Image (spheres, rainbow, N blue to C red):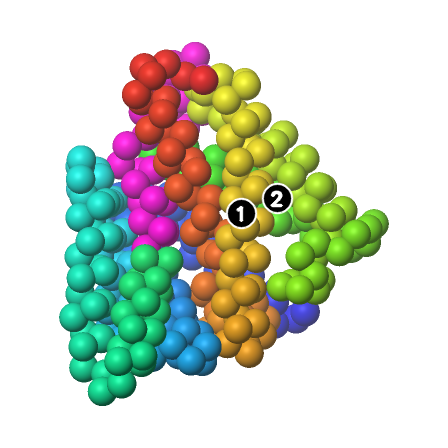
Amino acid sequence: MQQRLISTAVMVPVVLVVFLLGQPWLTMGLAVVAGLAASEAARLLRAATLPVERAVVIAAPPVAVLAMGWGGAPDGAAITFVAVVIVLAGMVAFREPDVRDGFLAWAGTAFGALYVSLLAFAAGILAIAPPIPESAPLHGVLDAGRDWLLVLLVTVWSFDTFAYVSGRTFKRGRFLNHISPNKTWSGVLGGTVAAVIVGGGLTWAAGGGPIGGLVLGFVIAVTAQSGDVAESMLKRTAGAKDSGTLIPGHGGVLDRIDSFLFAAPAVFGYLVIVGHVGTTI
C-alpha cells in the first residue's frame, strides 16, 4: 500500500502538468505511454508463446498516436494504418523457419501493434472535438479537446473507483471468474451506475445532450470493464500477475491504461456521430 501511495503521489502531478500544458505535449505524452505499454504487451505475447516481432509491436502505437493527434484522422487514415500493420507484420513473419511459427508471429505481431494503438483514439479526441457551446458549463475552462478527454478520463476513473468500492463492500456474484477471479457483479453494477451519472453529467457540461450523455456513460462503463478484462485474459495466458514493474505497487503501464484502450474509441465514436448528425445528442 505504501508503494502504491508513493507511486500515485508521483504520477498524479506529472499527468496533471502534461494535461494542463495541452498540445503538443499531451499528444507526445500519450505517444510515450503507448510505446511503454506496447513494450509490455510484446513481452506478454511472447510469454503466451506468440513469437512476435517486438520492433513492429513497439513502434506502431506511438506512430498511431502522433498521427491521430496531429493529423486529425483524415478519411482513410485509420484503415490505411491497419493495412500497413498487417502487411508489415506478415512480411517480418516470413523469417520464421517453421511455417506455423511464422503464422503465429504474423497474428501476434499484428494484434499487439493494433491492440495498444487503440490509445490513438484518445489523441484523436483532442483533434476532432467540436467547439464547446457558450452556454455549456465547461466553455472556456479548457480547449474542446481537453474538455472531452476529461469526460473520458473522469468517467473511467469513476467506474474503476466505484467498482472497487462496491465490489469490496457487497461482494455479490462472481463476474467472469474464469478470467478475473476478484471481480464481482456488485462491483460491475456499482461502477456502471457511477459512470452513467458522471459521464452523463460531464457530457452535459461539455454541451452534449442529456440522453446521449447517459448512453455515453453506460458505453464507457461497458468498454472500460471490457478493456480491463481483456488485459486480464492476456496476462493469465502469459502467466503474469502484472504487465510490468515500471510503476511500483501498480504494476505496468498497460495495467494503468487497459480500460482506456477500449473506452477511448467509444468517446471518439460519440464525437464522430455528433459531428455527422450536426447536433448534440
Q: Quadrant of residue 84?
A: bottom left
- Is there any visible trace of residue 25 in the rendered image? no
- Is there any visible trace of residue 47 in the rendered image? yes
Q: Nearer the viewer, residue 171 or 178?
A: 178
Specify the principal SS of the magenta part. Answer: loop
Tell me which residue sits at (22%, 39%) in the image: 73
Q: Which mark is residue 224?
A: 1
Q: Few, some or many C-alpha atoms within 10 Å of disc 1 (few <14, some 14-19, many ≥20)?
A: many
Residue tagged 2:
159
Q: In the image, residue 133 lies at what x, y percent?
A: 38, 16
Q: Quadrant of residue 87?
A: bottom left
Quadrant for the N terminus in the image: bottom right
Tell whether position 264 is magenta.
Answer: no
Mark 1 or 2: the one toward you: 1
Q: Nearer the viewer, residue 139 or 80?
A: 80
Q: Which residues are magenta?
A: 117-141
Tell me which residue sits at (47%, 56%) in the image: 257
| Residue type indicated by callout 2 | Phe
Look at the picture and state if 12 lies above or below 35: above
Of marks 1 and 2, which one's residue comes earlier in the chain? 2
